[in-house]
Image (spheres, rainbow, N blue to C red):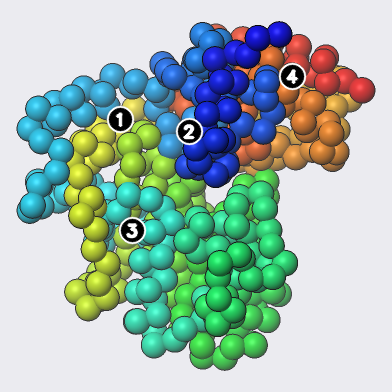
Amino acid sequence: MSETESEKWTKRLNNIMPWGSSTCSKAPRFAPEEPGVIVKGKGCRVWDADGREYIDFRNSLGPVTLGYCFPAVDDAIRKQLDDGIIFGHPHPLECEVAEMLCDIIPCAEQARFLKTGGEAVSACIRLARFVTGRDHIIQIGYSGWLNSLASGGRVLPNQQVQNSPSGVPTCISSLHHACGWNNLPSVEQAFDDYPKQIAGVVVASGYADIEAGKSFYPALRKLSDDNGSLLIFDEIVTGFRVAIGGVQEYFNVNPDLAVFGKGVANGMPLSVYVGKREIMSQFQKVIVSSTFGGETLSLASAKASIKTYINEDVIGHLWRQGQKLWDGLNDIFNKYEIPAKVHGFYPCPQIIFSQNEVREKFFRSAYRNGISLYDIPYVNYSHKDEDINESLDRLEKACIDTKI
């Protein structure tokens, strides 16, 4: 059998770069069913190098919240492109988008921009250490490779290490302490082990059990206040999905600092770090600076995306379509006795399998039937009723193939 175009690309990529991708989680693990490369996207669908179409629930691992080639966003990018991409001084968009974000994110009184979520979390960690005069950081969940420093922490969303992560000196790793989502005793223990030494608590939601945030976030707020530490929310996934203002809006708990990424610009590379004015103002002394922080195409995309969120019921759509799809998939799992279940909030759930071999078989079958999935799958604003119905038909075929 001759190689497909996707297989040829995968071979070339693996030859020229580690992992075969610049993003570890994008490297195909279920070839040949899973596409080696994607060459085009429109709305909620993508196409590979062989012309195969998939209804997409990866959404570039989360950033595509409105849909591929969303007209209002693409028009804003094209218009700004005519005026220039980046300059040697701030552009008005930098101010306008920061003001918009401070209007809609509960904890935000000032805002700044970078390109990736991980580096924005790192900026907040540096600031927390300066403001508190302390060194130790509690980290809950995965906040990007730059911050995968703790022994026992997550080096990828679905991968933990027992010792210090590769390439991280022990002296640095020893300052970072991994605690589990909704595991308050482990957080309390870290505060007890390092009294008056914890600069900040960085928390990314556990998506399968995100509802626990109702009690966990207030408890973290109180612990941080009682110990003089800053509370930092990683809203990279939850922002512009669970609510426009993320879990802080949904659960009504304000952190001191927060990081947003992914959905803020519908796929353009932009991250935001925001917080209380008295804390953010200390960036006058704590230097975080990047040439591309004010890049205008991403800011134009963000402005158009935020306007869409404000003027249209994007969040309601993500919840409604997510409920229709994931409840439907759970029904199909039950019907065919597949040992799997979709857990968590409908806009950003997690598919949990009781057996790895079933997981692999299901994912391969899903790709074979034209569904592109991820362990934490997403609907976007372009998933209409007919797309959800077609997806459930394809997923049922995948479950029939998977049934043991």
| Helix, strand or loop at mark 2 | helix
Q: Is residue 350 visible?
A: yes
**Residue with the mark numbered 4:** 365
Upstream in sequence: badge 1 or badge 2: 2
| N-terminal-most mark, 3 or 2 | 2
**Other-residue count near label 3 (Cα within 10 Å), few / some / many at <14 / 14–19 / ≥20:** many
Which residue is labeled 2 in the image? 60
Q: What residue type is labelled 1?
A: Thr
**Which numbered circle lies on residue 308?**
1
Compare residues 264 and 22 and report the one nearer the observer: 22
Question: Closer to the N terminus: mark 1 or mark 4?
Answer: 1
How many residues crowd mark 2 within 10 Å: few (<14), some (14–19), many (20+)?
Answer: some
Q: Give the CA distance from mark 3 to mark 2.
A: 21 Å
- The residue singled out by tag 3 in the image is 273
**Residue 285 in the image: above or below residue 94:** below
Q: How far apart are marks 1 and 4 (CA)?
A: 35 Å
